Image (cartoon, rainbow, N blue to C red):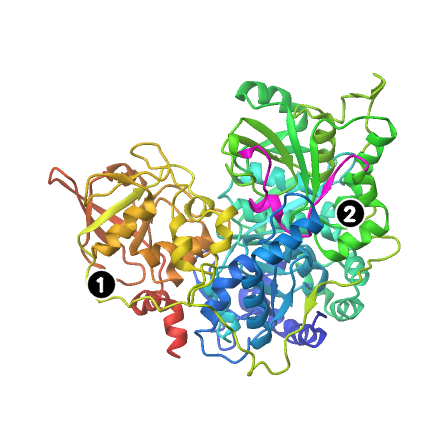
Amino acid sequence: MAFDIEMIKKVYGTMAARVDKARELVGRPLTLSEKILYAHLWEGTPSQSFARGKDYVDFAPDRVACQDATAQMALLQFMHAGKSQAAVPTTVHCDHLIQAKVGATTDLAVANSQSKEVFDFLSSVSNKYGIGFWKPGSGIIHQIVLENYAFPGGMMIGTDSHTVNAGGLGMLAIGVGGADAVDVMSGMSWELKFPKLIGVKLTGKLNGWTAPKDVILKVADILTVKGGTGAIVEYFGEGATSMSCTGKGTICNMGAEIGATTSTFGYDDSMRRYLTATGRQDVVDAADKVASYLTADAEVYANPADYFDQLIEINLSELEPHINGPFTPDRGTPVSKMKAEAAANGWPLKVEWGLIGSCTNSSYEDMARAASIVEQAVAHGITPKAEFGINPGSEQIRYTIERDGIIATFEKMGTKVFTNACGPCIGQWDRAGADKGEKNTIVHSFNRNFSKRADGNPNTHAFVTSPEMVAALAISGDLSFNPLTDTLLNDNGEEVKLLPPVGDELPKRGFDVEDAGFQAPAADGSSVQVAVSPTSDRLQLLAPFDAWDGKNITGAKLLIKAFGKCTTDHISMAGPWLRFRGHLDNISNNMLIGAVNAYNQEANKVKNQLTGAYDAVPAVQRAYKAAGVPSIVVGDQNYGEGSSREHAAMEPRFLGVKAVLVKSFARIHETNLKKQGMLALTFANEADYDKIQENDTINFLDLTEFAPGKPLTLEFVHADGSKDIILANHTYNESQIGWFVAGSALNLIAAGKA
């Protein structure tokens, strides 16, 4: 469980020399992000200044973290790599496969029974390959990483898009697909396009009802869900140093919602306090010796416009609490304007549920501040109008807030305390009545609020806000309630105005826990057996994908032309489908069932060109595969936004889709497609999207000349015999073309050629 202080000292031991060399090479002061990037260049990488947003660069991350839903496929792939042990420190965290329904004790017992096969598999694979294993109920991956493994100046990757949470401790922590994790676990380099840099200068200081969550809600409103794509967001200024480490984590966490590669903060006293409180004084001692390398050079923050590709400035003293949504996390509304916005858009004002937790807001400080609002309501005799639920971030958090009376405070208001797990945030919520599909509003402190994400009901209007605002809105039962100005009526009919939230940044008596839930791997796992039943519907050993035959793809059919937002939730839904994350064939039955067909504006209903009939997307694709007919998928902007789940790339690959052609990609999904041997292409002219017709047959005219920087030419033959020739851009380099040729990146690793 313990952090590897020797590994951290080794990172710090080489950082100074590498950063000094990079500064000379670049010829100017460096941002924090650049320092960490240059300090983690793969050994043997050419000494040069890399062009932001253009050059692919090989890096050597310090750690890998996987959550249980994505770890299944990642570890199934790692078993093919032929390695005896993970090459870098790696952990697996069981937090996704636990459904919230009754409460922690009952729900955890149900999960341990229903998913025993998967948990046993993950435990045994971890034991065999030297991987730390965090048991179900131990907590949410990103909270546990922050408490145990994150460290200033480090670089880690994780098979979850919210790995970026560790930026709260000054890391560059980046969400990836499982194939990327397998590369690093196998001792290979990890490839990333050198990011652009967005600077966010925070002035002033948070006060009153405004929380760190409001910073990222405001940034999301400014940048939108794709404004951070291909960039690292670096926060700095007096406002940054004045907030807590876990508050910084919240801000970095939701950077995934703007498409950012990652987000980070410079090393400061709040990080020292948090590291010390979580038993890592050794890290503080080591970090203090290289502290100047764990933040940007002074000239950068003095003249940020000269060093960042984009600069945003936010005065925290003037920042108003925000409520973002519904259906997208970048639609920001200041609390003072919510009443008018809701009326103008027909959003239901009655709040049915308030939910606090998830990897975004489940720290001690989050729980304490929200509880202070609940405590006021109880003291004043106010009966809550909405149901209320919390998910503590880890067993350490749960145990400590129970000891300190915070859970008891929540329970006075009838709050349901769910398991230390993701729960409703990822659709693992058995919400009573959700199947009725009624129009309703919920508020939560999570990071995502896509349609159907929390409870499966497309008519649930989910709004994202801070834990303290969730508490206030749930108590009032009114989305338009503004605690800064409005009052509530208590049970005696008296008007009560809630005071601003208060809560300790860290527990005064320190953190405590009886059993954190960690299982250390065997010292020698060579004799450990990993059993996967051939009749299992949860787990399935992988077979290699076929290599490219070296010919142009011809006679391909259009599977679907996706209309509008198409996230990884649309491409490979979570919720009840999480049970099949380790079985590629079974989970492929959810492929693109949430995507809207541009031709009929319906989900999961596309034309089978072999029969002329309409059917579910997976059924049509399986028909094409059985007939040996290739197919392609066409999409809109920011295709693949959201989770890092590589199933969204593996499913179409498994079922025979050859290419995905879109207006633009989300970063992680584009990489996942490449890793699995797919063609990830973008329209050279976005207007060509409108030329694609439902009955098209597609021919690649020059795939045999596939080369870096050279667009591909596709011929779309329409039903009337007419044709449109369309140019498709791509971002493949020589190595990535090698993945396509071999059938997948994993095929090259298994062959020892990567």
The magenta region covers 412-434
Q: Residue 126: percent from the left, percent from the top?
A: 58, 71
Quarter in which the N terminus is drawn: bottom right
156 falls in the magenta region? no
Residue sitting farthest toward the left: 721
Q: Residue at x 76, y 26 (%)?
A: 484
Please state, as top left, top right, bottom left or bottom right, where the C terminus lies in the image.
bottom left
Q: Which residue is mark 1?
A: 705
**CB under 8 Å between callouts 2 and 1?**
no
Secondary structure at badge 2 equals helix
Q: How would you rate the neighbour count of disc 2 (Cα within 10 Å): few for under 14, some for 14-19, many for 20 or more?
A: many
Kindly identify the residue that appears in the image at 64 percent across and 29 percent down. Answer: 352
| Residue 419 on image: x %, y % | 68, 50
Mark 1 crowd level (few <14, some 14–19, many ≥20, 10 Å Cα): few
Say left or right for 277 vs 425: right
x, y percent for residue 97: 57, 54
490 to the left or right of 45: right
- Amino acid beneath label 2: Glu
Q: Position of residue 527 (x, y in %)?
A: 56, 83
Q: Does the rendering let one see residue 590?
A: yes
* Camera-nearest residue between 183 and 495: 495
Q: Is residue 467 above or below residue 735?
A: above
Residue 644 seen anywhere in this rendered image of the structure: no
Amino acid type, label 1: Glu
Main secondary structure found in the magenta portion:
loop
| Secondary structure at numbered mark 1 | helix
Q: In the displayed structure, does residue 159 sit left or right of residue 563?
A: right
Circle on res. 365: 2
Identify the residue at horizontal 45%, vertical 57% (top origin). 646
**529 or 18, nearer to the observer:** 529
Quarter of the rendering containing residue 37: bottom right
> Does residue 107 lie above or below 414 as drawn?
below
